[in-house]
Amino acid sequence: MANYDAIVLGAGAAGLMCAGVAGQRGRRVLVIDHAEKAGKKILISGGGRCNFTNLGTAPDRFLSANPHFARSALARYTAADFLALVERYGIAWHEKTLGQLFCDGSARQIVAMLLDECDKGQVEIALGQGIGAVDHADGRYRVSYGNREASAPALVIATGGPSIPKMGATGLAYDLARQFGLKVVEPRPALVPLTLGGEDPFRALAGVATEVVARSGKAAFREAMLFTHRGLSGPAVLQVSSYWRHGEPITVDLLPEREAGWLRAAKRATPRVGVAKLLSATMPQRLADALAQQLGVVGELANLPDAKLAAAEQRLAAWRFDPNGSEGFAKAEVTVGGVSTADLSSQTLEARRVPGLHVIGEAVDVTGWLGGYNFQWAWASGWAAGQAV
């Protein structure tokens, strides 16, 4: 049996970050992953260009049963810190909307950078190795993988959540957490398209997008919404999906620039114009026509009573959709829920009652908004654990 200072389960964003940091601190580190390639989820992210962080990173952009838990790690390893690493490797990048940073080239550059950081720390990486039994006795963790065994006083669970199972994602992190007596906050799909059942009047609009403000409870996001064959998607809907619960509606302001009374004002100014024509100034014509039909405001404004126009304004400002579900873990970018933060140190990500056991990245009950926040949590939590093992 080979002996190490730390064994990291998972060669994704958090696991590689942790291993590189620990290795460069002089620790002997082994990373084990059942995938044949390291960083598989990194490679497909951001359309293959990896939205690797967000300049607007702040604790209030993360969901958790303990909204303050992420604060420590995020403060000690910031978006600027990761960007400095990217620039040290000469990786060209650009900023898109809302502080999102992407590679100019390919997400492969980020994986290569992380692997190089691991090489600098002489980290051993075992890929294509199924993880078998994991045991803890006499202050050491023993892990069976492939036909081998390894032992270390520190074990880092960085196997992510169950989102995107076709990439090999599993619930292993939760199984291990429960094995060691840690609580798990019920995992559910996040950053995921929502589905509309029954007679969805907008199904014919699949592929049409428009800028909206989408709301679920107190959460509100102004971005694009996309109609799909199954329901709703696009950044605004993906964002609110993390907050949405089964049985709840979401509401959408389809005209975020318009103030109350705008239709009635338009009636006085341009009585011969139709509602669909007015709507098409700020949204695709197909959507404008469908909304006018749904609202029963077809024809010239002059022929429509003010009360009907007022009702149309109100509905357009808070259009109610009742999702019957989501597209599930298969299409979810990340997972809400996970290993309970109540059982972990916010400083080191170490289990409070199980010395040497750390849980990082998506496996933890910390979930960021869309736009690079989840990668920044992976870097920050990985760095924090890498400093501690």
Image (cartoon, grey):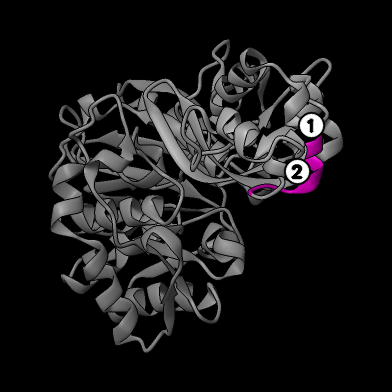
Residue holding disc 2: 277
Q: Position of residue 188 (x, y in %)?
A: 51, 26
> Looking at this rendering, what residue extends furthest in the right direction?
204
Image disc number at residue 177: none
| Residue displayed at 58% across by 19% down | 310
Is 363 or 246 nearer to us in this picture? Answer: 246
* Residue type at the position of mark 1: Glu
Q: Earlier in the sequence, mark 1 or mark 2?
A: 2
* Residue type at the position of mark 2: Lys
Camera-near label (1 vs 2) is: 1
Q: Is residue 332 magenta?
A: no
| Residue displayed at 44% across by 67% down | 125
Q: Position of residue 68 (x, y in %)?
A: 18, 34
Residue 195 in the image: above or below residue 74: above
Q: Give the alpha-carbon distance from disc 1 to disc 2, as whole Å.
A: 10 Å
Hey, which quadrant is residue 30 in on the image? bottom left
Q: Which residues are magenta?
A: 282-289
Is 104 or 206 nearer to us in this picture? Answer: 206
| Residue displayed at 16% across by 70% down | 25
Q: Is residue 288 magenta?
A: yes
| Residue displayed at 21% across by 61% down | 78
Q: Main secondary structure of the magenta part?
A: helix
- Quarter of the N terminus within the rendering: bottom left
- Quarter of the C terminus within the rendering: bottom left
Q: Position of residue 146 (x, y in %)?
A: 56, 53
Residue holding disc 1: 300
Residue 354 in the image: above or below residue 358: above
